Amino acid sequence: MTVFGPSRQMILMTAIASALVSAGVQNAQAELVILNVNSVASSLALSGEIGGAAPGGGIAYAEQSPGSLLANWGGTIRADLTAGLFTFAPGGSAITALINPNGPFTTAPNPIGIIPGNYGTTATGPVPAAGGATLTITGVYRDLVLDITSGTAQNGAALSGATMRFSAGALDFGVSALAPSGTSTLVGSNGLNTSTSLVAWDGTTLTIPVTFQTTGGTGRIENWTGTIVAAVPEPSSLVLLPLLSLFGLRQRTRRAI
């Protein structure tokens, strides 16, 4: 049986203590983490209205085709992580809507025509802003990218102060009569995530419940609900580095004996 001499034992014990202390100090500090959004597990449903001068004054969205108001999302989430608490800041996240497989969708009579998009909407009814005339409005939401510009998240608690903001995206729409067709930007549209469901974080996967509302030109009101699931791309280096260092030291010590 191999017996370590006092000096080698001291070297190994000192290295172990140093690595553990170092890991403890690092874990107490903020760590920048980038999580990859799982596009299979992440989806947001869209509901809302268009054409109103005030909430409740427009006509409600319906599907252009089955499934056209539900889209999957991918991209990345970036945040500071300190002792299990995620803190979000502007420009950190790029949560991107995928092309909806239930499209393409139409913007007719808008000459943009039939195009792929993230969501396909249609709405038919009397619009007070058009003098009570009955209109049919078709729309395609496209190129949507979300950022989480503020707030915090931690396991077992509801989100706190988390604002969802569109950093990219637009609505191309067409109107049957009496009103012009066009494009409405979603860039800058934002809303507080008011979901009361609890965040989940198991050390590798973050699950964020989503409920927020945005508004904009053409009397748009959008309600976004669903779940975003994101995971670290590989085990955290903060955990692996001390372990790898200890393993390498032990191997070198054995070879030296």
Image: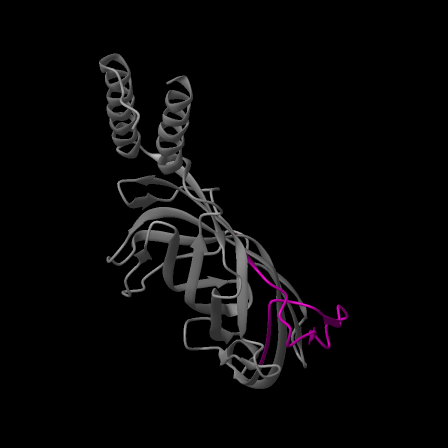
Main SS class of the magenta portion in the image: loop
Q: Which residues are magenta?
A: 95-122
Give the residue displayed 26% in from the left and 28% down from the top: 25
Inspect this view and state whether residue 52 appears: no
Residue 170 to residue 233: above or below: below
Q: Nearer the viewer, residue 29 or 146?
A: 29
Residue 8 to residue 77: above or below: above
Which residue is outermost to the top?
A: 7
Q: Position of residue 206 (x, y in %)?
A: 38, 55
User: Does the magenta-highlighted stretch encompass residue 119?
Assistant: yes
Q: Nearer the viewer, residue 86 or 18?
A: 18
Q: Position of residue 72 (x, y in %)?
A: 54, 66
Residue 158 to residue 234: above or below: below
- Asked which quadrant contains residue 243, the reply is top left
Q: Position of residue 37 (x, y in %)?
A: 49, 55
Check the picture and name the quadrant holding the N terminus. Answer: top left
Give the residue displayed 31% in from the left and 58% down from the top: 200
- Asked which quadrant contains residue 210, the reply is bottom left
Check the picture and name the quadrant holding the C terminus. Answer: top left
Q: Nearer the viewer, residue 218 or 11?
A: 11
